[in-house]
Image (cartoon, grey):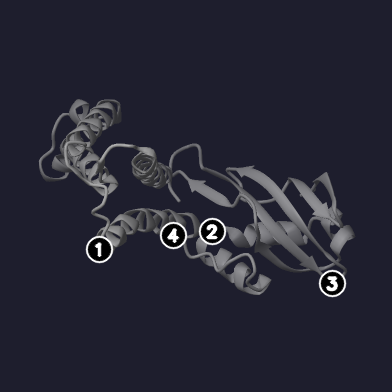
Amino acid sequence: MTIPGWFRLGATIALGLYLLGVYTTALAFQQISTRKSAIEPSFLVLGCIIGLLVGSLPFFLNFLTPIPYLLYSPYIILPISLLLSFLGIRIACRYERSKSNSTLRVLLFRALIPCAIALTLIWLHNGSFPSVKAPAEVRQEWAYIQFGDYKEVVNSIKTCQPILERVGSVKVVAPTQGRNYIISDPGSSGHQGELTLEVIGDKGAGVANFNFHIVTSVSQVRFTNRGKTETIVCRR
């Protein structure tokens, strides 16, 4: 993805973890509290979200009417949004309920919020990846669609002599469990990333992990084969 897209993904995950933390903390305190009345965790999450939205209002208004950058700069928006989210949580703390009022509807509503947040985080983390247990050919086809210049990666592995000596003629190169990302930048810094790929040959298989910058190809790679990991260099 692009660098702005990478930051948006990070912000979304951070927001999900923040809301999940607010909810689970409130739920834990509710269970150990000896008071006759308890704070409803879902109200805290709602107050937190409202505070964050109000604090981020200048950012959304900028899409409708251009405003000075200072008003929607992350260095201004973030602390104000956090402060307003704390204020929303504080206001929500005033709405208490009897601890004995645990109807099925309340319990279902209470479980809905963390489930929704958790499912969102899982979806963001996995994307459309077909699963590590999917056939290598399926994962390879997915990579061709998702990763730009993936053919160059495959071609550089197929011509890397140290890899050929270990697994034979390469048949399939597919993403596997590990770090797999590419950050593209249309500016002068090009793109960079890291890939962890299962390499299947006619004599065996291994896992290649490597970083790259500007040029999407393999040069120095950490290759695991038969339980042994070593650093090898692919000559061009």
Please tell me which residue is depicted at 27% across the width and 47% down the height of the picture. Answer: 99
Q: CA distance from mark 4 to mark 2?
A: 19 Å
Mark 3 vs mark 4, foreground winner is 4
Q: Report, in whole angstroms, how far the alpha carbon at label 1 lies from the one at label 4.
A: 27 Å
Residue at numbered disc 4: 123
Residue 56 in sight here: no
Q: 2 or 20, which lies in front? A: 20
Query: Viewed as shown, does residue 194 lie left or right of 89?
Result: right
The residue under label 3 is: 202
The residue depicted at 70 percent of the width and 49 percent of the height is 209
The structure residue drawn at horizontal position 32% and vertical position 59%, both measured from the top left corner, is 112
Position of 127 with respect to 25 (left or right) is right
Name the mark nearer the viewer: 4 or 2.
4
Q: Position of residue 123 (x, y in %)?
A: 44, 59
Query: Which label sits on residue 147?
Result: 2
Looking at the picture, which amino acid does disc 4 mark?
Trp
User: SS at mark 3?
Assistant: loop
Q: From the viewer's perspective, is the residue at label 3 or at label 1 nearer? A: 1
- Residue 49 drawn at (x, y percent): 24, 43
First in sequence, mark 4 or 2: give its number.
4
Along the polypeptide, which appears first: circle 3 or circle 4? 4
Q: Is residue 93 above or below residue 9?
A: above
Q: Position of residue 139 (x, y in %)?
A: 61, 68
